[in-house]
Amino acid sequence: MKRTSVLIVGTSLVLVVAGILAWNGVQSGPAARSDAAEIARGAAIYAEHCAACHGENLEGQPDWRSRRPDGRLPAPPHDETGHTWHHPDTVLLGIIAEGPGAFVPGDYESDMPGFSGVLSAEEMQAVLTFIKSTWPPEIQARQRSISQRWAGADR
């Protein structure tokens, strides 16, 4: 009886995850399986390295737009309510690797460290893939357009 219950719960969980991935625009086939694996990998890395500050549900810290007494901003959300999707992938990956201070002009200070010595480039990409998978399709499209324009610009 217990084995049957575990099988039913496990099957239900797989169906729920598949439904969420389908809802977020992931198509079926080999690419979808690799996307699903990349998203799952990114979710696990995010939970371990990012969720403590940016929130388990990517919600960020409270009052994230107001500077604290030390002059630093709280961690922003990475869901569609934040500004993450306003940046191209190249910049987002750079911020993950080097921290925001490397990309924000002036003497910007942040509590966020760079993860270049902690995470591989593939792991950083997996985290970004996970974050982007949570955005509504229209936000994903807008951010994709920003990334494409950035890639096509003379740098």
Image (cartoon, rainbow, N blue to C red):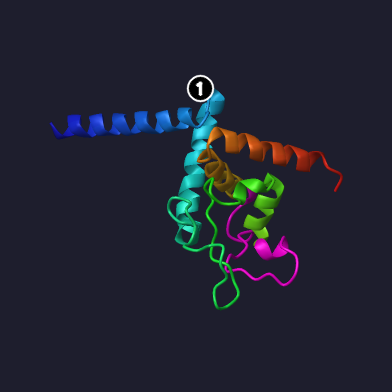
Q: In this view, does 153 lie to the left or right of 6?
A: right
- Label 1 neighbour load within 10 Å: few <14, some 14-19, many 20+: few
Q: Does the magenta stretch include residue 110?
A: yes
Q: Is residue 64 magenta?
A: no
Residue named by callout 1: 28
Q: Residue at x 50, y 41 (%)?
A: 134
* Image x and y of residue 49, in percent: 50, 58
Q: Number of labelled discs?
A: 1
**Relative to the observer, which residue lies in front, 67 or 144?**
67
Q: Which image quadrant is residue 98 in?
A: bottom right
Main SS of residues in magenta: loop
* Image x and y of residue 35, in percent: 54, 33
* Image x and y of residue 58, in percent: 48, 51
**Relative to the observer, which residue lies in front, 70 or 121?**
70
**Relative to the observer, which residue lies in front, 137 or 53?**
137
Q: In this view, does 23 lie to the left or right of 145?
A: left
Amino acid carrying mark 1 in the image: Ser
Q: Residue at x 60, y 37 (%)?
A: 140
Which residue is most to the bottom?
A: 69
Q: Is the residue 30 above or below the residue 20 in the image?
A: above
What are the residue bounds of the magenta stretch?
Answer: 100-121
* Image x and y of residue 143, in percent: 65, 40
Q: Is residue 66 left or right of residue 97?
A: left
